[in-house]
């Protein structure tokens, strides 16, 4: 085992082996019975056919102790006390790198110049300690899990590039032989200020930017409801009925599938290929038997393939379906693989799945009710786009587009009746399950423009919240840290994949360079509101210990 003091030429070679061996020893100890590694000392030597050309450093439990600066050819200690403890000559790090470059050339020849992979970084931004307005603090931008070691980091404040108070580390080794890099920004927090960290890497199509802003209370704007109501509830109880019409071969083949869901779990479904209900859960099997014994109800569902599905397709075809022709063949219904072990005259053997139940277009009627606010939703959707819904406050039908109203003639009372049945069934399921609460799934939030952004030309920002449960979610907008109240439209709750929900918020705006917009989302599945920022693309400066990508793009590969 080598020390960190002066070394002989033999020791330099053994040091290279020690790095590899230290990783192996750590792995073996973890695999042995009940043993854990207390600490890991790592010597890392990295070299590549790019800029920066290499790194040599020592790390203790993942934290850098010191490294060799290849420009000054000096040892740089992370903390002053490290220099008092260790006596390391930079020359030996340079010798390690020389051996590394020698071996690199050999491996390039052996592999016939095959280029290595490119793995993009995951970027996070966070303060080093709890932030107080007016008190000096430090923001940390962490880029991790990337390959190779070519990565630039730059900072901005309210859209303006920063050059002072920045310290960026060299490249640290990370798990699975990837790398990480940290950038630190000293700052004084002030209410409303928005900071951003921009990262460039060869695996990214364009620079990625992560924003940070001091937390403050969020406003509830436009069709939102305080989550305090939800937090007072003892549980989550939600019942859904979804009727899907699947159209294939330009409407020549039509299927109808009705699915009943309770607390995000499919209970039973009707498939027109079988001609009856199939129960999945114990409660679902009880209901399936009940419905299957109701001959009149089954006959109406079978006939609905024509009276409901085909009828509406003929109404929609000229005005809506033909306009959506580019999206043909990309829609499926959410039915998992279920081994029913039954057959019917139609030849359905229970082995068909949702992926097989795909169509050129899907018309969906969705009814949702829950013991929360909003209490329910009723709407029609074509290929995931909303056609119309029933407003429970005004008890009127709200059409998404004018041409949809010209096609359909739907009475709001029909939707209200469906919701009444939904609430009746919800109470039954709550009693059957002894008031067992349903799951909570947090949303995935994205912000993007509706059209290509040009400065000064009106546009619309979309905040998409998806894959959450239950349907209790607030959305609000801010511009440069100031809440926005005008130009906002928030949809009702749309059915999503795997019986989750999605909701969209639209903000009309005029792009101006430097403006930063944020979408703020609250949901019971989030410990605290989540905020996603967006600003028009700007060229990123190469600040502080960064290197231009021009050298990388001219290279013939990753080695």
Image (tube, rainbow, N blue to C red):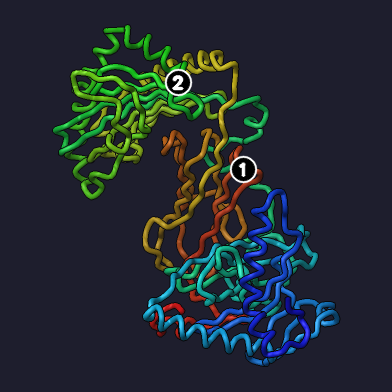
Q: Decide: few, some or many residues near mark 2? Use Cα within 10 Å; few <14, some 14-19, many ≥20.
A: few
> Mark on residue 332?
none
Q: How many marks?
A: 2
State left or right for residue 224 relative to residue 403: right
Between label 2 and label 1, give the one nearer the viewer.
Answer: 2
Q: Please name whichever residue, 25 or 271, is drawn nearer the observer in this view of the structure.
A: 25
State left or right for residue 141 relative to residue 386: right
Rendered view: 420 above or below 242 = above
Residue 168: horizontal and vertical position, in percent?
Answer: 65, 76
Residue 392 at least partly seen: no
State left or right for residue 100 relative to residue 412: right
Residue 105: horizontal and vertical position, in percent?
Answer: 47, 86
Q: Quadrant of residue 308?
A: top left
Residue 352 at least partly seen: yes
Rendered view: 528 above or below 148 = above
Q: Which residue is mark 1?
A: 526
Q: Which residue is mark 2?
A: 281
Q: Secondary structure at mark 1?
A: loop
Classify the position of the N terminus by image quarter: bottom right
Marks 2 and 1, Cα distance to the nearest angstrom?
A: 29 Å
Residue 57: horizontal and vertical position, in percent?
Answer: 67, 79
Rendered view: 463 above or below 166 = above
Residue 264: horizontal and vertical position, in percent?
Answer: 48, 30
State left or right for residue 309 relative to residue 529: left
């Amino acid at each position: 085992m080598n020390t960190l003091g002066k070394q002989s030429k033999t020791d330099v070679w053994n040091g290279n082996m020690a790095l590899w061996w230290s990783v192996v020893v750590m792995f073996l100890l973890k695999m042995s019975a009940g043993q854990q590694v207390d600490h890991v000392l790592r010597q890392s030597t990295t070299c590549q056919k790019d800029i920066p050309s290499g790194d040599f450093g020592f790390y203790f439990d993942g934290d850098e102790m010191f490294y060799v600066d290849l420009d000054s050819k000096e040892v740089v200690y992370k903390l002053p006390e490290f220099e008092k403890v260790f006596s390391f000559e930079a020359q030996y790090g340079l010798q390690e790198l020389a051996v590394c470059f020698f071996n690199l050339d050999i491996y390039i020849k052996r592999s016939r110049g095959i280029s290595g992979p490119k793995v993009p970084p995951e970027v996070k931004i966070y303060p080093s300690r709890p932030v107080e307005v007016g008190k000096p603090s430090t923001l940390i931008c962490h880029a991790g899990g990337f390959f190779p070691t070519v990565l630039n980091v730059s900072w901005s404040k309210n859209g303006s590039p920063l050059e002072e108070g920045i310290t960026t580390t060299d490249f640290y080794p990370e798990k699975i032989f990837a790398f990480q890099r940290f950038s630190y920004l000293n700052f004084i927090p002030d209410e409303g200020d928005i900071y951003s960290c921009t990262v460039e890497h060869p695996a990214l199509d364009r620079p990625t930017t992560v924003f940070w802003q001091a937390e403050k209370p969020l406003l509830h704007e436009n069709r939102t409801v305080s989550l305090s109501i939800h937090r007072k509830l003892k549980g989550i109880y939600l019942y859904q009925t979804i009727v899907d019409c699947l159209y294939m071969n330009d409407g020549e083949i039509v299927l109808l599938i009705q699915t009943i869901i309770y607390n995000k779990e499919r209970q039973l479904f009707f498939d027109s290929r079988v001609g009856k209900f199939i129960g999945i859960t114990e409660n679902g099997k009880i209901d399936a038997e009940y419905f299957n014994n109701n001959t009149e109800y089954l006959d109406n569902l079978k006939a609905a393939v024509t009276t409901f599905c085909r009828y509406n397709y003929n109404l929609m075809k000229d005005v809506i379906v033909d306009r959506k022709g580019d999206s043909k063949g990309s829609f499926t219904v959410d039915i998992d693989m279920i081994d029913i072990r039954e057959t019917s005259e139609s030849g359905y053997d229970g082995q068909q799945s949702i992926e097989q139940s795909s169509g050129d277009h899907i018309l969906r009627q969705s009814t949702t009710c829950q013991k929360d606010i909003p209490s329910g939703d009723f709407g029609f959707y074509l290929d995931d786009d909303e056609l119309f819904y029933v407003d429970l406050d005004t008890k009127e039908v709200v059409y998404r587009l004018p041409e949809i109203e010209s096609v359909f003639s739907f009475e709001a009372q029909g939707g209200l009746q469906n919701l009444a049945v939904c609430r009746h069934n919800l109470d039954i399921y709550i009693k059957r399950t002894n008031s067992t609460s349903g799951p909570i799934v947090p949303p995935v939030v994205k912000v993007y423009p509706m059209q290509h952004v040009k400065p000064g030309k009106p546009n619309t920002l979309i905040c998409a919240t998806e894959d959450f449960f239950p349907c209790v979610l607030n959305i609000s907008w801010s511009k440069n840290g100031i809440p926005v109240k005008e130009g906002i439209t928030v949809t009702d709750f749309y059915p999503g994949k795997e019986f989750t929900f999605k909701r969209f918020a639209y903000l009309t705006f005029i792009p101006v360079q430097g403006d930063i917009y944020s979408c703020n989302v609250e949901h019971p599945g989030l410990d605290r509101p989540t905020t996603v920022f967006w600003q028009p693309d700007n060229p990123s400066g190469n600040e502080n210990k960064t290197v231009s990508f021009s050298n990388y793009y001219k290279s013939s590969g990753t080695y």
